[in-house]
Image: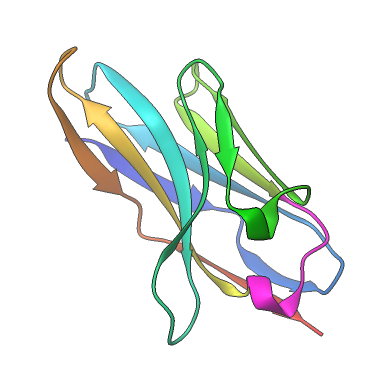
Amino acid sequence: QVQLVESGGGLVQAGGSLRLSCAASGSFFSLNPMRWYRQAPGKQRELVATITSGGTTNYADFVKGRFTISRDNAKNTVYLQMNSLTPEDTAVYYCNADAYSDPFRYLEVWGQGTLVTVSS
């Protein structure tokens, strides 16, 4: 069973930065891709950024130029560097991955989430 555990959330002032981490544990063949989602109060969960095992990244328009997703495959960890934060970035941030048990079969797994609060 694969587990994803996020860390790094907290309270930050507008214009500040935070770095989220998500560490994967358990037995798996690969994690591809890995993603960050977020859910603000009263809103639907939305995709923030994606990274493949080869390092290809993709971002939602609302974070382009401010957030950077990266991963350390040796540590089975994905990161989200968040800069120039605004109160609109306040949300619970979730780590997500397609966890392959072999080259063909996978399950989508989620972390428990970490709260990011940006004060004005």
As drawn, 115 above or below 66? below
For the image, the number of numbered tags is 0
Q: Based on the picture, tell me whether residue 88 belongs to the magenta stretch.
A: yes
- Up-down: is 91 above or below 60? below
Residue at image x 31%, y 19%?
30
Please name the residue shown 15% across and 14% down the image.
Answer: 102
The quadrant where residue 63 appears? bottom right
Q: Quadrant of the N terminus?
A: top left
Where is residue 62? Give x, y as percent.
66, 60
Is residue 4 shown left or right of residue 91? Answer: left
Residue placed most toward the observer, 119 or 54 = 54
Up the image or down, 93 lies above or below 52; here it is: below
Q: How is the image coloured?
A: rainbow
The region drawn magenta spans: 82-89
Hey, which residue is sitting farthest right in the picture?
15
Q: Is residue 51 visible?
A: yes
Residue 72, percent from left and from top: 56, 23
Q: Give how far across and how far down residue 73 sits, in percent.
A: 49, 18
Q: Residue furthest front?
A: 61
Q: Is residue 106 left or right of residue 59?
A: left
Q: Residue at x 34, y 26 (%)?
A: 31
Residue in the foreground of this view, choosing between 84 and 57: 57
Considering the image in quadrants, where does the C terminus appear? bottom right
25 with respect to 39 (left or right): left
Tell me the residue at 48%/63% (across/down): 38
Q: Is residue 5 magenta?
A: no
Residue 78 in the image: x percent, y percent?
Answer: 52, 35
Is residue 26 something one can see in this rendering? no
